[in-house]
């Protein structure tokens, strides 16, 4: 009886090992899928979802916390409205950057810019940063009564200096829209934590100064 039990145990060992390998391969595949999904979100964000309004809160670690509204109707037509503390507003339109010190009642030209080139440079930097992605994790988290899919990971960005980053996205399970995002960035002499609440704004209209 002892011998037969031992034989049964030995005969099951390869099957157990095989099951373990299969389980590990499934875990690896899921981790890879999660990393790929993070990279896509990092580079493309919400993609061409039309006009949006973003409520942005940024904490400078060891310093101040600020809040602003950021609006965009197109990559070359956007505006930032300072809320806390109140301050200068910024507008981009038709390849020109403007500023306002009277809450958008009047605009002064700051400089000309190349929106297409800036957008491509930003996209290129994000694609390069995406290749450094590590520690990707996907899950589910309730927000506003909805079970959002969460996608997060670490990556390194090099924009003049090396910056360690952790991004987390809350993605609507049906539409794929990023409703919330959290960014934690660390550099040699600087650290910040930023939360964005993003909403579609199909009726959004921004100033068009001449």
Image (cartoon, rainbow, N blue to C red):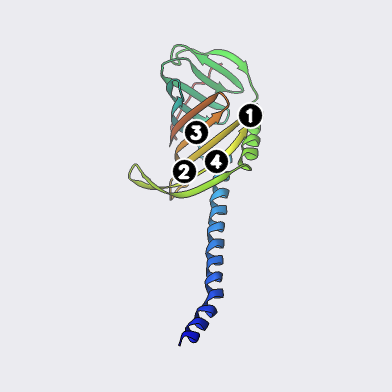
Q: Are marks 1 and 3 in contact (CB under 8 Å)?
A: no
Q: Nearer the viewer, mark 2 or mark 4?
A: 4
N-terminal label among 1 and 3: 1
Q: Quadrant of the N terminus?
A: bottom left
Between the C-alphas of marks 2 and 4, the distance is 21 Å
The answer to the question of whether label 4 and label 3 lie on touching residues, with beta carbons closer than 8 A, is: no
Residue 80: x and y, percent?
Answer: 48, 23
Q: Position of residue 42 (x, y in %)?
A: 56, 40
C-alpha distance separating marks 4 and 3: 9 Å
> In the rendered image, which quarter contains the C terminus?
top right
The residue tagged 2 is 177
Please tell me whether mark 1 or mark 2 is closer to you in this view. 1
Q: Is residue 207 above or below residue 43?
A: above
Nearer-N-terminus badge (1/2): 1
- Nearest to N terminus: mark 2 or mark 3: 2
**Which circle marks residue 184 in the picture?**
3
- For numbered disc 3, what is the local secondary structure? strand
SS at mark 2 in the image: loop
Going from N to C along the chain, the mark reached first, 2 or 4, is: 4
Q: CA distance from mark 1 to mark 4?
A: 16 Å
Q: Nearer the viewer, residue 163 or 169?
A: 163
Give the CA distance from mark 1 to mark 3: 16 Å
Which circle's residue, 4 or 3, is located before the other in the chain?
4
- Label 4 SS: strand
Give the x, y percent position of residue 139: 44, 50
- The reply to whether the C-beta atoms of the residues labelled 1 and 4 are less than 8 Å apart is no
- Closer to the chain start, of discs 1 and 4, is 4
Furthest residue in direction front, as rendered:
2
Mark linked to residue 154: 4
Q: Residues within 10 Å of mark 2 (few under 14, many from 20)?
A: some
């Amino acid at each position: 009886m002892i011998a037969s039990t031992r034989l049964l145990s030995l005969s099951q060992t390869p099957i157990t090992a095989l099951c373990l390998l299969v389980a590990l391969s499934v875990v690896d595949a899921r981790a890879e899928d999660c990393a790929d999904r993070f990279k896509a979100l990092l580079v493309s964000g919400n993609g061409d979802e039309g006009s949006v309004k973003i409520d942005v809160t940024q904490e400078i670690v060891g310093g101040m916390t600020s809040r602003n509204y950021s609006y965009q109707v197109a990559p070359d037509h956007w505006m930032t409205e300072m809320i806390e503390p109140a301050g200068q507003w910024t507008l981009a339109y038709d390849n020109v950057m403007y500023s306002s010190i009277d809450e958008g009642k009047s605009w002064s030209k700051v400089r000309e810019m190349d929106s297409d080139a800036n957008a491509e440079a930003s996209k290129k930097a994000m694609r390069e940063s995406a290749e450094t992605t590590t520690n990707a994790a996907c899950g589910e988290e309730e927000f506003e009564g909805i079970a959002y899919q969460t996608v997060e990971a670490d990556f390194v960005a090099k924009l003049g200096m090396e910056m360690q980053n952790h991004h987390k996205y809350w993605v609507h399970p049906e539409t794929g829209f990023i409703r919330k995002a959290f960014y934690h960035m660390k550099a040699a002499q600087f650290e910040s934590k930023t939360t964005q609440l993003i909403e579609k704004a199909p009726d959004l209209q921004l100033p068009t100064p001449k």
